[in-house]
Amino acid sequence: MRITQIEEVGKGRYNIFLDGEPAFVLYKKEADRYGLRMGEELDEMTYQEILHDVLGTRSKRYCMNLLKTMDRTEW
């Protein structure tokens, strides 16, 4: 997978495009940690690590925060 574009979306967040399609949004420190640069190849192992470790953890934390702040069911 080739990184075709890195677009800033505000507050230090970047939209990462792989093969011309938007793939995910990372913070600047995360993008720097993985050394993501436009035009470079992103190997499958790094891609899976970003999906599982970074985005998976972030989404779980976000969902738990939603549940903590307000009931989300009728019961």
Image (tube, grey):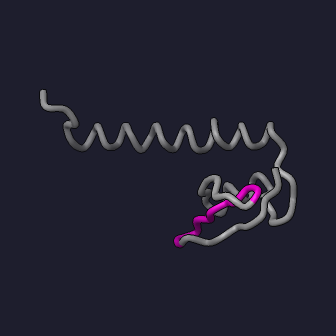
**Can residue 66 be found in the magenta stretch?**
no
Q: What stretch is highlighted in magenta?
A: 10-19
**Can residue 15 be found in the magenta stretch?**
yes
Quarter holding residue 13: bottom right
Residue 60: image location, x then y, percent: 46, 37
Quarter holding residue 8: bottom right
Residue 56: image location, x then y, percent: 56, 38
Q: Is the magenta stretch mostly helix, strand or loop?
A: strand
**Residue at x 48% of width, y 42% of height:** 59
Q: In this view, does 74 lie to the left or right of 52?
A: left
Residue 4 position (above or below residue 33) = below
Task: Out of 56 and 30, give the one closest to the viewer.
Answer: 56
**Residue at x 38% of width, y 40% of height:** 63
Image quadrant occupied by the C terminus: top left
**Residue at x 62% of width, y 63% of height:** 15
Q: In this view, does 53 lie to the left or right of 74?
A: right
Residue 33: image location, x then y, percent: 75, 54
Residue 21: image location, x then y, percent: 67, 58
Count up the numbered dots.
0
Q: In this view, does 14 lie to the left or right of 39?
A: left
Most extreme residue toward the left is 75
Most extreme residue toward the front is 20
